[in-house]
Amino acid sequence: MRMPVAETDVIIVGAAPTGLTLARELRLAGVRTLVLERLPEPRAVAKAGGLGGRMLEMVRYRGLLDRFEAASGQPRPAPRFPFGGLHVDLTELVDPPMQALLLPQPQMESLLEKLARELGAEIRRGHEMVALRQDDGQVSVDVCGPDDAYQVSAQYLVGCDGVGSRVRQLTGIPFPGITYPEVNRLGSFSMPDALTLLDDGDYLVPGFGRLRSGYTQTANGVFAISSYTPHDLGVYTSEEENRTYDDDQPMTVAEFGDSVRRVLGADIPLGEPTRLTRFTFHARHVERYRDRRILLAGDAAHLFPSGGVAVSAGMLDAVNLGWKLAGEVKGWAPPGLLDSYHAERHLAGARTLLHTQAQVALRRGLDAAAHALRDVVAELLLDDPARRRVGALIAGADLRYPMPGADPHPLAGTFAPDLALRGSIGSVADTLHAGRPVLLDLADRADLREVTPGWHGRLDVHTAEADNRPADAILIRPDGHIAWAAGVDEPAGTARGALRESLSHWFGLPDV
Ligand SMILES: Cc1cc2nc3c(=O)[nH]c(=O)nc-3n(C[C@H](O)[C@H](O)[C@H](O)COP(=O)(O)OP(=O)(O)OC[C@H]3O[C@@H](n4cnc5c(N)ncnc54)[C@H](O)[C@@H]3O)c2cc1C
């Protein structure tokens, strides 16, 4: 084995949604980044079907929405979102809190890889991390590459290596939780000629009769059927099975048809498949996201037992971690900054586990009481406030990180609202493309701007006007969360001190 051939700032293990997002975030901050991926080629197996919620907002805040929409080729639906064996219809809400973009995971990964490479991330495919060790100064790993084995070292290493994370195992971080016995299968098809879509959304199946749109609990599991358009058909089954499957082994149409027959007790016609996935649900959460110089993100750190949220959760880990690691590597990070990654993202993971676990309870039961519970919840979800609340929960839009200080402004800790701005910048989202912290002065407060010169190397300051400004100024972190806000007409004395404290807390000491 050769001795170290390369030194870098951060090694990322795993080039999938989480690792590739982190690679771009680190490159935005000028951090040398090496991504090791054991697969020689991008994975072709369909997993997630798209991206939604807060991460889709974040994509927009980075100025990348056009690229994602172009890769998707689909209009952005405000979906009938699955929630605990029910569908939540968010389409009728004004400004729905949950939006999603259809973009199958292989295409998403290919775009993310391109975006990371464009900013100079080094991505080595066919390079498997097989061992690692860390000391006070660095982390080093043994890598099995296509041509030889070698070692490489870095200041930090992030395990974005998925459900069976080798990084997590080698670091000895516990991953408590449970794996559910149901095997879930999801198929998207073109609408077959033999199936009739009725005006009320139900289906007429030859030899079977009427099939209700949405979820149906049967004696053998759960069956669901629905269509976004008259030309497509989505079918889902969930059943208990005494065997395990490899997530990277694709599912065939025959396997899917067999499952439909077992769960529904009948065959139904299926069109041409456009996406076939099989998955098992786990509810697992690492006890800690950090072990000194090693960090975990994405599926390596959390697994949720309901669909549609996992990819976004991992990518949001990456956005939270990127600028904090950059602070450590560049030497400006204040004490505790990197530990706030665990504090904040463990909180976020726990919140996502809370509603995805609640969905398990809601969808699993087959007895009359369970049916009654689903009916009651379905009724409640017809009310706009309840739908909005659940939409925000799924989107992760209700997350508020605790912020230091005695009496933080109500906006502190929340994701910055995309206020329309008058002046040279169109909106708040436009200020975050570069992934740098931003002080947005909404009331021409020279007294507050005067506090900032010591941080100008790492802070952007903008003055703009907004209708009904919610604050005189907001300090926005690179991950879009508000670190601090000055109340409307807040006196200079208190506001200046609090701004200085917040700048020091998140972005270190001012340059002299
Ligand atoms: C069938 C299926 C359907 C799904 N549907 C959805 C959905 O609709 N919505 C949703 O949000 N989520 C869905 N998910 C979950 C989603 O796919 C995962 O949350 C997501 O892939 C996690 O991304 P990640 O980057 O954290 O990890 P992964 O995607 O698991 O990537 C880990 C990467 O690390 C690499 N790696 C592992 N070990 C090493 C090593 N030692 N050295 C080098 N490289 C290594 C792997 O090859 C892999 O490329 C689905 C999952 C499955 C299996």
Image: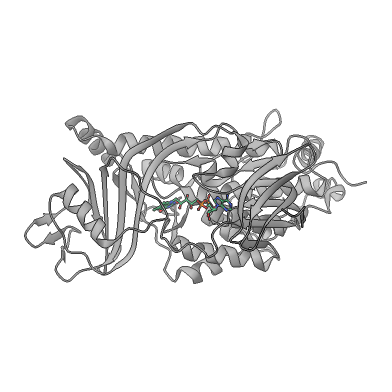
244 vs 460, left or right, is: left
325 vs 510, left or right, is: left
183 vs 270, left or right, is: right
User: Which residue is at the front of the view, 333 or 248?
Assistant: 248
Percent across and percent down for residue 405 are 71, 31
Percent across and percent down for residue 300 are 54, 43
User: Which residue is at the front of the view, 396 or 209?
Assistant: 209
User: Which residue is at the front of the view, 48 or 89?
Assistant: 48
Percent across and percent down for residue 389 are 42, 41
Against 63, residue 156 (above or below) is: above
Percent across and percent down for residue 304 are 44, 41
To which quarter of the image does residue 113 belong?
bottom right
Say if residue 124 shows up in the picture: yes
112 vs 185, left or right, is: right
Residue in view at x 74 percent, y 56 percent: 29
Residue in view at x 8 percent, y 63 percent: 206
To which quarter of the image does residue 371 belong?
top left
Against 486, residue 100 (above or below) is: below
Q: How is the image coloured?
A: one colour
User: Which residue is at the front of the view, 11 or 205?
Assistant: 11
Say if residue 486 shows up in the picture: no
Residue in view at x 87 percent, y 48 percent: 454
The outermost residue toward the left is 207
The outermost residue toward the front is 1
The outermost residue toward the top is 406
How many marks the image carries: the answer is 0
Residue in view at x 71 percent, y 59 percent: 28
